Image (cartoon, rainbow, N blue to C red):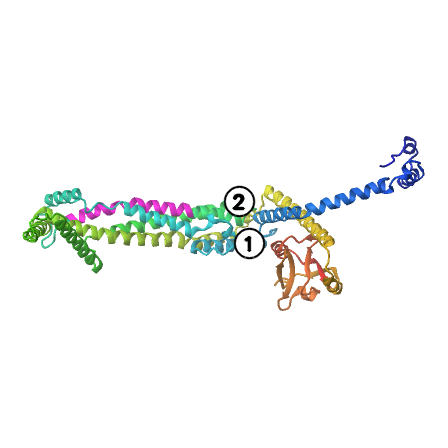
Amino acid sequence: MVKNRSQFQNEEGISYQAAKEDEELFFRDHPTFSCLDQRLLGSSNLALTLTKLLVLRIKETLAPMKRQVEVMLSSIRADVRAVSSYGSASCPSERQKLLVTLTQEFVRHLNDCVRGEYRDRLIVCNPSLRLYTRALIIFQELQTKVAATAPHFRVEDFITNLAHQMEALRGRELPGFMSAQSFYMFIQEFINAWSAPARMAAAQMRALANEVVRELFGKIAVSYPLLRASFREVASTILETSEDEALRLLEGLIVREKDPFTINEFLQAHINKLRYDRFESSVDDAFRGTIQDSSGSGSWQATKEHVGASLRSWYRTAHGVSSSANAEDMSAILEAYWTLASKRFVDNACMCLDDRILGTLCGKVQEACYQFVHDEAKLEAFFTEDEAMVARRTQLERTRDELIKANAAMNNIQAARKPTPRSQKSTLMRSPPSHQLKITVAVRSQGLGLQLADEGGRVVTRGFRRDSAAQRAGIQVGDVLLEINEVSVGCFQDAITKLKSPNQPSITIKVLRCR
């Protein structure tokens, strides 16, 4: 229960202290209220009770609130990294250096994408940049499409049609050759079907590489829209030329596979295997068609006669001088050649696409982009930052700094309310106190010479390079970086970016140091 000020007291402008003393006197001298528990009376006791209730509520909700703030902070840091640039440039020499830096960074990441080395954070977090893995899918599709063009060599209709065509060409073949013209004609027809899948694979590889280049450079040069557009145009032109080169090589591969005299030991072995398989199949058919004689003594003789007749019939069909026998043998040769040639073509086509489209991409892009180094007009236009992106980055950095302060305040609250075990009190009492220092470091051409580490979200000094400017200025091992040029340090990458910013004759660093 409290006693409010009267209208007269408000008009007289009585102070808070005088009103509080008047309230205490009222409750102490009142005949009824003076008999009550004084802890239930007065604005001071009310404020104390409400404070205790508020502290209890904060203790209950502090841990969930802190976890929520840490999740938000992690998300904001990721957003800041996504829109951060590699520095600013205000003069021609700085713009040249920045272009070279961005080009080298882009080519390094693109090389990793092409070779399938996905260790970098940018590629790990963006699976669509894994160029080599996605290219393997295109290669598998090419293999499937080429295999789908295989004729049905062992189907009766195919062999019958082959016999008719060979009969039509009789008398035109070279002496000593078994219908070489037929073989050449059929192989040309079968292998021509590989052209469409190969051209499709080349177009898919070009589109895939173009997509990865666009996305990768969009993430590296996020603040420079004109530079991104120029890089994309360069890459598109290079990939178009590379696709044309790859298509010419693919056509050459197809022409080479059409040669009917391309024969080797593997082909001969495969032909013999097919012939053996067909003989084995005829033997199985002969025994499968055996009619068992019910009389015991004559059944074996009947089986012998049946199998012998069946195999003689197969031999006359497969090895005689008839059109069907020639067609059967030609079918085996065509199947053997097609199987080996298709496998060889797919392997060579994949190597061709990999080499001509992906293998030369990095070097050609780097060479083309370096040509902009001496074009000052283009450089100035390239490094004009997108105003909307700059505003968004500024807002994200402000939000990140606020969340860092909120997280630090919650850590202090938790540390203040955490009970200290007796066994730890003496240790804490002996721990050295800390203090904050501001140190100005002159920036040299080789940098500050600092070796930093990320320890629990804090940026800590862990060593120095030889002749370190930071060490000469007074920074010591164990110093925790708090601010750089009056701006709070957010995360490890944020500190590195601020320390490496160009056009800084000196840097003022605020550190936390244990005495």
Give me the residue at 71% from left, 65% from top.
Answer: 474
Q: Residue furthest bottom?
A: 466
Closer-to-camera residue (240/481): 481
Give residue 226's mark. Answer: 2
Per the image, the residue denoted by label 1 is 96
Closer-to-camera residue (86/134):
134
Q: What residue type is labelled 2?
A: Leu
Q: Is residue 184 magenta?
A: yes
Locate residue 6: give its quadrant: top right
| Residue 275 picture location, percent across and down | 16, 54
314 sits left or right of 429 in the view: left
Sequence-wise first label, 2 or 1: 1
Q: Provide residue 318's location: percent of width, then percent of height.
A: 11, 50
Quadrant occupied by the N terminus: top right
In the picture, measured across the screen, residue 25 lies left or right of residue 183, that is right
Instruction: Identify the mark at residue 316; answer none if there is no mark.
Output: none
Q: Position of residue 368 (x, y in %)?
A: 46, 52
| Magenta stretch: helix, strand or loop mostly | helix
Which span of residues is magenta-colored?
182-208
